[in-house]
Amino acid sequence: MARFSGKTVIVTGAARGQGAAEAALFRAEGANVVATDIFAGGGILVHDIADEVSWQRVVDNALTRFGRIDVLVNNAGVLSTKPFEATEPIEFDRVMRVNQRGTFLGMRAVMGPMREVGGGAIVITSSGAALTGTPGMFAYVASKWALRGMSKAAARDLAQYKIRVNAILPGIIDTAMAAENPPESLALFKSLIPFGRFGTPDEIAQLVAFLASDEARYITGAEFAIDGGLNA
């Protein structure tokens, strides 16, 4: 079913993992996809999400090629596995610059083009780590909690333009980023998941596509945990 035929979707962090799965699913469902990442190659547009000029280049590329922007998937982010006492200001700033500032700049960059086509959908990737005070990941957790608030505030402000904003909160997903966690932490997390396994990028992509589709046209300001029951 081509749910996104004629629509243009921007997916950040699309070189691997969840972003790659999301971009592939949107293409399969008929979308014009602008896939971006800090890493080049494979049809990926090089993009630093924390840089305003870089965002403008992405938007200009989408409008030049396809004439419109309908969906933004704010997927790109960075991980930090340091506890509070080991988190230096430079590390805190690095994580917040990418995860929080990058998401803000993305929403800001697509707002105008979405208004011009009568609305749109933004999906923000927060984290299941933003449902608790997950230890050993201070800056990361802080940034993902911030995204929860940003998604709700933006949903309120942008509803008047028929722009929907929702957040997903993935648990441990089988990606290269998850593998950056210490092995003992991964083993502990898996033992706590009621489903007994990590999620897959394809499972995340299915939820993102639903939230971006017209099937979710009355959903905004919502949060969706997708974690195999870890935070139930």
Image (tube, rainbow, N blue to C red):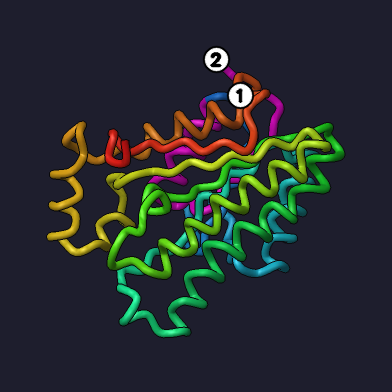
Residue type, mark 1 in image:
Ala
Residue type, mark 2 in image:
Met
Q: Disc 1 designates what residue?
A: 216
- Which image quadrant: the C terminus? top left
Label 2 crowd bin: few (<14), some (14–19), many (20+), radius 10 Å: few
Residue 217 % position (x, y):
67, 24
Q: Disc 2 designates what residue?
A: 1
Q: Is residue 125 magenta?
A: no
Residue 4 % position (x, y):
63, 25
Q: Earlier in the sequence, mark 1 or mark 2?
A: 2
For numbered disc 2, what is the local secondary structure? loop
Segment colored magenta: 1-28
Name the residue rendered at 47%, 84% in the picture.
90
Q: Nearer the viewer, mark 1 or mark 2?
A: 1
Distance CA(mark 1)–CA(mark 2): 16 Å
Name the residue rendered at 53%, 26% in the picture.
210
Residue 26 % position (x, y):
54, 32
- Which image quadrant: the N terminus? top right
Residue 196 % position (x, y):
16, 35
Label 1 crowd bin: few (<14), some (14–19), many (20+), radius 10 Å: few
For numbered disc 1, what is the local secondary structure? helix
Q: Is residue 19 magenta?
A: yes
State the residue in front, 176 or 227. 227
